[in-house]
Structures are given as structure tokens and as C-alpha cells.
Amino acid sequence: MDRRYFLSAALSAFAAPAFARRPAERPRVLSFHHLHTEERISVTYRVGDNYQRGALQKLNHFFRDFRTGDTVTMDPKLFDLLYDVKAHLGDTDARYEILSAYRSPSTNRMLRATNRGVAKNSLHLTGQAIDVRFPDLPTRRIRDAALSLARGGVGYYRRSDFVHLDTGSVRRWGA
């Protein structure tokens, strides 16, 4: 092996990883309209592999229990799921309508007393669940997109016109 070949091979080994890096991911933006508070928010919550701390704090407040004002740290994987659902549907700029996100224990008890479909240990209590829809899209399309991702629970509430998404185990319910 001559000297030039050796130097060329050595330089290639060091340079290859720099050129092999994947292109920078597009910043992940989520937009929401909370139907109970009438608040709206649009935030860049993640850039590449880095969650944006300030954006996550804004989202934790936005998804507070609207009845009590209590907050919890929402699961960032839930935001990734929401982003991937709308990307799967082909519209990364879509604005979700929010019906329910975090629920305090007192709110969950109250809802359980009046609705038989509310789970005692709901993932809404831990910031791992959200009930959503889009204003201009059938909720079955959201359900189908979420089911195809196979990353958590998907509940379909056709009559109430919303989809429950969570970061728990993969499961489904509803029509």
C-alpha cells in the first residue's frame, strides 16, 4: 500500500461521518384552538432532536385544566404524536381544536360521576392524553392516521365528533 493511498483512506474515514449527517429536520410547529377557553397558540416546540423548553412551558399552561387552572408537565411524546398525525394527513400547518387535555383529579372525579366513559386512571391525569379534532376534516381521518402510526391509545367518538389520543399502550376503542 503506498503512502498516498493510505492518507486518502485515512482522510476519507474521518470526513465521511461529517458528510453522512442527515439534513436538518424542519422545525416542528403545532397550532391549537382551545374550544373551552377560546385561546389560540402556535409554537415551535421542537427543532431537530431538541425540545424547546419555553415552548413546552407555554403548552403546559395552554393545556391546563380549564375548570381549575391546575397544570401538569405534558408528555412531549404527545406533541410528537400530534405533529406526526397532521403530517400523515398532509397538512403540517393545520390547527387542532382542543376539547380536553390535562384533567385535575377533581375534574376527572366530577366527569366520572356524570359520564360513564371517563376512566378512573385516565391518562388525561398525567398529561399523556388529549381530545382533538380539526374544523374542516372528518374525525375518522384523524383516527385512521393515528391508528396507522401505532403509538398509543386512539379513541373514536363519532357522535361527540372528537378523537382521543394518548401516549399509553397501543390500543383502540370506539366505532
Image (spheres, rainbow, N blue to C red):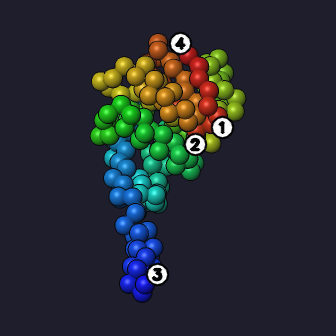
Which element carries disc 3, helix, strand or loop? loop
> Dot 4: few (<14), some (14–19), or many (≥20) neighbours within 10 Å?
few
Res 7 quadrant in image: bottom left
75 over 135 or under it: above or below: below
Q: Which residue is mark 2?
A: 127
Instruction: List x then y, in percent, for residue 42.
Output: 33, 47
* Callout 4 touching callout 3 (CB < 8 Å): no
> Dot 3: few (<14), some (14–19), or many (≥20) neighbours within 10 Å?
few
Q: Which residue is mark 3?
A: 1
Which circle marks residue 105 in the picture? 1
- Nearer the observer: mark 1 or 3; the answer is 3
**Left or right: 122 as drawn, with respect to 35:** right
Which element carries disc 4, helix, strand or loop? loop
Which circle marks residue 79 in the picture? none
Residue type at the position of mark 2: Gly
Real-space Cα distance between discs 4 and 2?
Answer: 25 Å
**Mark 4 or mark 1, which is nearer the start of the sequence?**
1
**Left or right: 163 as drawn, with respect to 111:** left
- Nearer the observer: mark 1 or 4; the answer is 4
Residue type at the position of mark 3: Met
Which element carries disc 1, helix, strand or loop? helix
